[in-house]
Amino acid sequence: MSTNPSLLSNRNYDVAVIGGGSGGAALATFLARAGHRCGVFEQSKFPRYHIGESLIPHTHGIFERLGLLPQLRASAFPVKHSVRFVSDSGKESGPFYFSETIPGDRARSWQVERSQFDQMMLDHARANGVEVREQTSIDQVLFEDGRAVGVQIVAADGARSHVAAKVVVDASGRACVIGRQLGLRSPLPELRKASAWGYFRGGKRLPGIDAGETTMFLIPGGGWFWYIPLPDDMVSVGIVADPEYVFSESEDMEAAFTREVALCAPLAETQLI
């Protein structure tokens, strides 16, 4: 694959980052601070919905380096100190407090509403000198002599143009822009899972330091439910299991989700139904 050689003489960016999610925004912020001209290309308009709300404690160091800890501490995101497991028989583990193995303030994290959190991350990247183009998709990564030299972008009005860069970073997540283009994606049978989730108000929360914990409700066949408290009395609840189990009675996702919540007695007791 090749592009017009003139592209090499007109570099717009040192680094072009595909995707403005938390990973792309963090990387672009660090690069901009190091003096590199960095552009982020995001196909959506933020804020936008995204799943994946429970941050692990080892992200604390990254937020510290980014300078985002003051914003996170001032936010309405529930503080997460622990995780707890509930077996399919209803037997509960004690909470696994991160402070048992991680010293100090680093032993806590947050349960985030991704639309707000990702907006925070992207705005922080802008404030650090990153050029962000929202509603801009990547039609293809441009190569010259086997090396990525830029991207072809598609603006919201459908107009296409080339953007040159010394380095192209694919932070598009599941979209896997470069992997799809080069045919590098391949299935991993051991990771073949179905997932369904929803949001509820009024679900039970534990008192005190445990109010923000992640609870994992195990179900037969190796699957599980997550139970994640969010701001404004919301909880995120989702099932992850083998597709054959989830859709054993119906291919209707909502029906399967409701059935499994009812079958998981400890979860049903949280007053979701």
Image: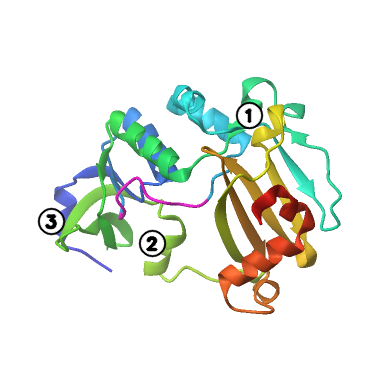
Q: Residues within 10 Å of mark 3 (few under 14, many from 20)?
A: few
**Considering depth in this image, is 135 or 182 the residue closer to the camera?**
135
Main SS of residues in magenta: loop
Q: Which mark is residue 178?
A: 2
Q: Secondary structure at mark 1?
A: loop
The mark closer to the camera, 1 or 3, is 1
Q: Nearer the viewer, residue 97 or 249?
A: 249
Q: Position of residue 27 (x, y in %)?
A: 41, 39
Contact between marks 1 and 3 (CB within 8 A): the answer is: no
Q: Name the foreground residue: 109 vs 29.
A: 109
The quadrant where residue 246 appears: bottom right
Q: Quadrant of the N terminus?
A: bottom left
Q: Which residue is mark 3?
A: 6
Q: CA distance from mark 2 to mark 1?
A: 35 Å
User: Does the rendering let one see residue 135?
Assistant: yes
- Amino acid of disc 3: Ser
**Which residue is tagged 1?**
108
Q: Is residue 230 left or right of residue 81?
A: left
Q: How far across and how far down the image is residue 18, in percent?
A: 34, 52
Identify the secondary structure beneath mark 3: helix
Q: Position of residue 23 (x, y in %)?
A: 44, 44
* Residue lying at 57% horizontally and 50% vertically, measured from the top left: 200
Which of the two discs, 1 and 3, labels the residue nearer the N terminus? 3
Q: Residues within 10 Å of mark 2 (few under 14, many from 20)?
A: many
Span of residues in magenta: 43-51
Q: Is residue 45 magenta?
A: yes
Q: Residue at x 77, y 47 (%)?
A: 85
